[in-house]
Amino acid sequence: MHIALIGMSGTGKSHWSYKLAETGFQRIGCDDRIAARLAQEVGAPPGEFFHMARWMGLTYEPHYPQRAEHYLAHEIAVMHEIATNLAGAQADMDVVIDTTGSVIYVPEATILELRRAACVVYLAPPLDAFQTMLAAYLQNPRPVIWNGVYQQAADESPLHAFERCYPQLLTSRDGLYRRYSHVTIPYAVHGGADVAVGTLLELIRG
């Protein structure tokens, strides 16, 4: 079975991809592949950990737009490569793809390639996600493609702009995740501490 997990960063994609890997699924981590390509592009020392969030920076920093564009270009290439390889893989091979939160910003043709090659599963965030996910992001910034949602007013601090725009980002992405997924699993289901891998697979297959 081929599964592609989509959703915002912090909703459980990596957690479940590793859980599935423990049961025999081959795991493909998209962030790992993007980081490897970027590290090579910028000439990072081989063997050293490449911190993508620090490299990309925050959306109000001068270098952010160009670096976000580079990040997305590599994401597009990685997703096309994965979808192409899965299309030629055996249907009974168990594969799980841990996508990035910005996968819904790659060209639609690439997403449709992924949909044909895998069951796309949206791990929805908790209902009170806006404040908890914003706090988690501010404490530990990760690479985020805002896709034009972040707009800082002239008399507004970056923190206030984040607080105002982050819920808009979640809302806009939620619609796209639902649009491109085959299955949506509520956080109340996939976020439970006692949820077994078998239960998740039953929901996906069902």
Image (cartoon, rainbow, N blue to C red):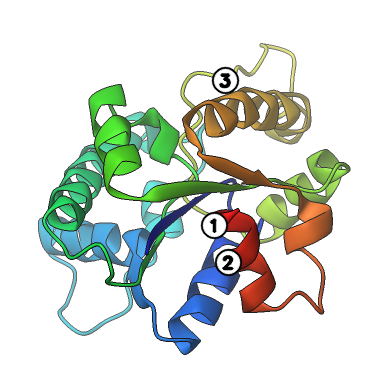
Type of residue at label 3?
Answer: Val
Q: Give percent across and percent down for residue 199.
A: 69, 70
Residue at which label 1 appears:
205
Image point (76%, 74%), residue name: 195
Q: 10 Å neighbourhood of mark 1: few (<14), some, or many (≥20)?
A: few
Residue 174 numbered mark, or none? none
Q: Give percent across and percent down for residue 162.
A: 70, 32
Q: Is residue 176 above or below residue 137?
A: above
Residue at which label 3 appears:
149
Residue 134 relative to residue 14: left or right: right
The mark nearer the N terminus, 2 or 3, is: 3
Type of residue at label 2?
Answer: Leu
Residue at which label 2 appears:
201
Query: Are dots 1 and 2 in contact, CB under 8 Å?
Result: yes
Q: Give percent across and percent down for residue 114.
A: 30, 42
Query: Are dots 2 and 3 in contact, CB under 8 Å?
Result: no
Q: Is residue 25 above or below residue 180?
A: below
Q: 10 Å neighbourhood of mark 2: few (<14), some, or many (≥20)?
A: few
Type of residue at label 1?
Answer: Arg
Query: CA–CA distance between discs 3 and 1?
Result: 34 Å
